[in-house]
Image (cartoon, rainbow, N blue to C red):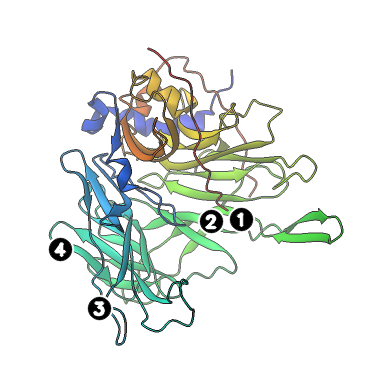
Amino acid sequence: MTRFPVALRAVLSVAILNASCLGTAASGEAAFVAIGDASMELDINPSLYLSDPLSQDGSTVVGTGLFDDKRQAFRWRQATGVVPLGHLPFEPPPGGNAESFQASSALGVSADGSVVLGFGVVGSPELLSPFPPPLPPIVNYETSGFLWTEADGLRPLADTRSASLLNTDGSVAIVSGEEQFVRWDAQAGLTPIAFEETGFFDLRALTADGASGVGVRRDPDNPPFTLVFDRPGFGDDIVNINPTEAVIWELTPTDDGTPIVPVARGLGSLPSDDPYAEAFAVSADGRVVVGTSHVGPFLDMESFRVEREAFLWSEATGMIGLNQLNGDESDQTLKISRALDVSDDGSVIVGDSTAPEGTITGFVWNEAMGMRSVYEVLVSVGQAEAIEGWSLGTVWGVSGDGTVIVGRGTDPQGESRVWIATIPEPGAAWMMLPGAATLLRRRSAVGGTNDLQHADRRPPTAG
């Protein structure tokens, strides 16, 4: 039986000590609920950015939906249901058509659900189009980040293009400016972030205090690797790919308003012929980072085998692979798992993975039980009837105490739906079980996001 090293248990012992302090969701009864109705076409990962759709207390879900024939940001709470948050204000430019184009998407939410951030798009079809009907007219449009509160409604963040990362109390956000990331502070306003990286880099998540974040950058210690695609009659297509590594960014604000210069700490990647890793989420205190990493070659050109593995990183253990749901299926060429979110103490991790049936589904991980499909988890807490006929899809978020999860899949009628579930088994408590089995293997660190589509349709299960 493979077990995690003592160092990892020491890191996660904080979770055990805090088990008695978990929020109300931890003591709630198991439940599975579809949010809104199918006509709303709700989405909780509406852009190329990885969204953070679930509040830390598990009470609030945000995203985008279709309301009055327009895409709008929404906020869901059990007491209110789905509430559209509106659009950015807009006035057509001189000579423009008064019929405006407006859309908004929520990408993040504060710990208690009171602050929502995202981006909005506004535009107006021009009166004169260079294209004859039925081709549509040219649309001039602008994008801007926004913050929403019940008191102020949806208000734009000036000189920004999007807002995608928010700290716990909603006082610090990372937004996209015209050419760079910008730190927004409720007191200090906007401060540029001056990355000194060359090539590809990105921020994906913030710690609770907003003082650091995680993401990805080009791996400075490894050279590009090459893929050669043979096209008979046309010669070879040669593609050079830069290796990447997961990274922690220290984002210490300056006192005088000068640009913040992030200090990068590379976390490397799991052992691979072609190093390629990225971090997607971080625990509240920054002690645990999760993401995905290639293992083996980037793409085996003989078998077209692709293998990525969700990982957990901590100071004490380095980077540890969490396996895939089909990790033991030697005949399958596609083995991919991504860790997309993590509870406050790092003890519960969620994401998606290829499954033994060849489909892709969400997973929930803790040390005691290892990686389990979200279907298995919900059946184990008595929700078999509620999820009968569902394809549960990716699990995009987990609450701070690890007992509430949110995802998007397909309901029994074939409609795409957002769902929220309570799994009353705090991850930390499982670590106390004597002899709890760890179904994982450890990999030592050696140092692009593929948006997996959902497919976890299983036959109805009774009991």
**Is tag 1's residue or tag 4's residue first in the polypeptide sequence?**
4
Where residue 347 sits, quadrant-wise, is top left
**Numbered tag placed on residue 152 in the rendering:** 4
Q: Position of residue 117 (x, y in %)?
A: 29, 58
Q: Can you say whether 350 is above or below 205 in the image?
A: above
Where residue 406 sits, quadrant-wise, is top left
Amino acid at pointer 2: Val
Identify the element where label 2 is drawn.
Answer: strand
Packing grade of label 3 (10 A; few <14, some 14-19, many >=20) is few
Per the model, the C-alpha gap separating discs 3 and 4 is 20 Å
Q: Which of labels 3 and 2 is toward the front? A: 3
Per the model, the C-alpha gap separating discs 2 and 1 is 7 Å
Identify the element where label 1 is drawn.
Answer: strand
Q: Can you say whether 165 is above or below 36 in the image?
A: below
Q: Residue at x 66, y 50 (%)?
A: 275
Q: Residue at x 33, y 51 (%)?
A: 63
**Contact between labelled residues 1 and 2, with CB atoms less than 8 Å apart:** yes
Quadrant where the image shows the C terminus: top left
Taking the image as drawn, is residue 376 in sight? yes
Q: Residue furthest left?
A: 151
Amino acid at pointer 1: Thr
